[in-house]
Each structure stands twice: as structure tokens, then as C-alpha cells.
Amino acid sequence: MRLLLVEDFRFIRRHVRTLLASISGVEVVAEASSGEEAVALARELRPDLVLMDISLEGMNGLVATETIRRELPAVRVLVLSRHTEAEYVLRAMRAGACGYMPKGAVGTELEPALAALARDEVWLSPSIPREELAYCAEHLAESDHPLARRQFEYAGYFPDKRD
């Protein structure tokens, strides 16, 4: 799996890169510290996966995710964020992210998340509070955004509709 790592804080980027180096079959092809740089590198390198921070200077990670997914639909994006609130998860999914992980969970969840994405599955971190995911799923019940809805359904977070 060829991976582009996008994180504006060098210390966090270095930590995540160290974790990635210990995962078999993962190659970090480049690092970016801004959304603009991430989009340019994704266009040039066409990685399999982008590990994307949300809070970036200039073009934020959500806009960068949306741009990458629109232009390069085969490139999957796993969003890393310090936020676990439903608002952020929803915005990431609507931008086209294929997964969402809080930064605090990266040490324990990175490898299983990458494995899930490699199988073309969705990763919604188990460390995100269930009530936040339930809110997201409920909100998407009325959404016309098929990708976001499909991601929640696939991950098993979409409530059954029984009439």
C-alpha cells in the first residue's frame, strides 16, 4: 500500500511515520504539511491511501479530501483528527473519506484501519463514542449523499428502517 501522510505538525507526522514503518506492506511515498501540498502530491504520485489531518493551514483537510476524491476516486482517504464529535465525522464522510480515526487512537488502531481500507472496507474508529456515530447515521438517513450513507451502512452503524 502506497501512502501519502498529511499532517502539519512535524512531531505528530514523525510519530505516525514511525508507526507506519512497523506495518508490513506499507510504503510512505511522501509527506505533506498542507492541503494544497497534499492535493499536488496525490495528483503526481497517485497513492493508494492518503492519511489526512483535518486541521491544516490554508486548504483544510476536508477540502483537500473532497478534491482528491473527486479527481482521483481510486485514492482512499483516512481522516485523522483530534475531534470525535459527530459534526466532524459527518463532514469527513461527506468529503469522501473512507475512514475516520481520532489521533489519540492512532497507536492502537492504525494497523487494523489500514487493513480494513486495503480490503476496500470503511473504518470508523471504535473509539468514537457510539452516540456520536448513531447521530451521524440518523442524520444521514435523510441525506442524498450516497457515499457517506454507504460508508455508514457498510460499517454497520446505520439504523435499520422498520416500518
Image (tube, helix red, strand yellow):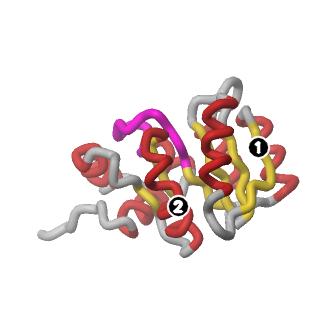
Question: Residue 34 falls in which quadrant of the image?
Answer: top right
Query: Which structural element holds mark 1?
Result: strand
Q: Is residue 54 visible?
A: yes
Give neighbour class at mark 2: few <14, some 14-19, many 20+ (Cα, 10 Å): some
Query: Which structural element holds mark 2?
Result: helix
Task: Point out which mark residue 70 bears.
Answer: none
- What residue is shown at x 80% (from left), y 60% (from top)? 46
The residue carrying mark 2 is 111
The residue carrying mark 1 is 31
Give neighbour class at mark 1: few <14, some 14-19, many 20+ (Cα, 10 Å): many
Which-is-in-front pick, marks 1 and 2? 2
**Image quarter of the N terminus:** bottom right
- Does residue 42 appear left or right of residue 80 in this picture? right
Q: Residue furthest left?
A: 163
Quick one: 80 or 9, which is closer to the camera? 9
- Decide: marks 1, 2 in contact (CB < 8 A)? no
User: Where residue 47 sits: x, y (%)?
Assistant: 75, 60
Instruction: Specify the segment rendered in magenta.
Output: 79-90
User: Where residue 66 sits: x, y (%)?
Assistant: 63, 47
User: Where residue 42 sits: x, y (%)?
Assistant: 78, 52
- What residue is shown at x 34% (from left), y 54% (from top)? 126
Quick one: 104 or 146, which is closer to the camera? 104
Disc 1 versus disc 2: distance between alpha carbons?
18 Å
Quick one: 151 or 125, which is closer to the camera? 125
Q: Would residue 80 be counted in the magenta stretch? A: yes
Q: Would residue 75 be counted in the magenta stretch? A: no
Question: Residue 35 falls in which quadrant of the image?
Answer: top right
User: Where residue 145 sits: x, y (%)?
Assistant: 46, 55
Q: Is residue 152 above or below residue 135?
A: below
Three-letter amino acid code at the position of disc 2: Glu
Q: Is residue 100 above or below residue 25?
A: above
Three-letter amino acid code at the position of disc 1: Glu
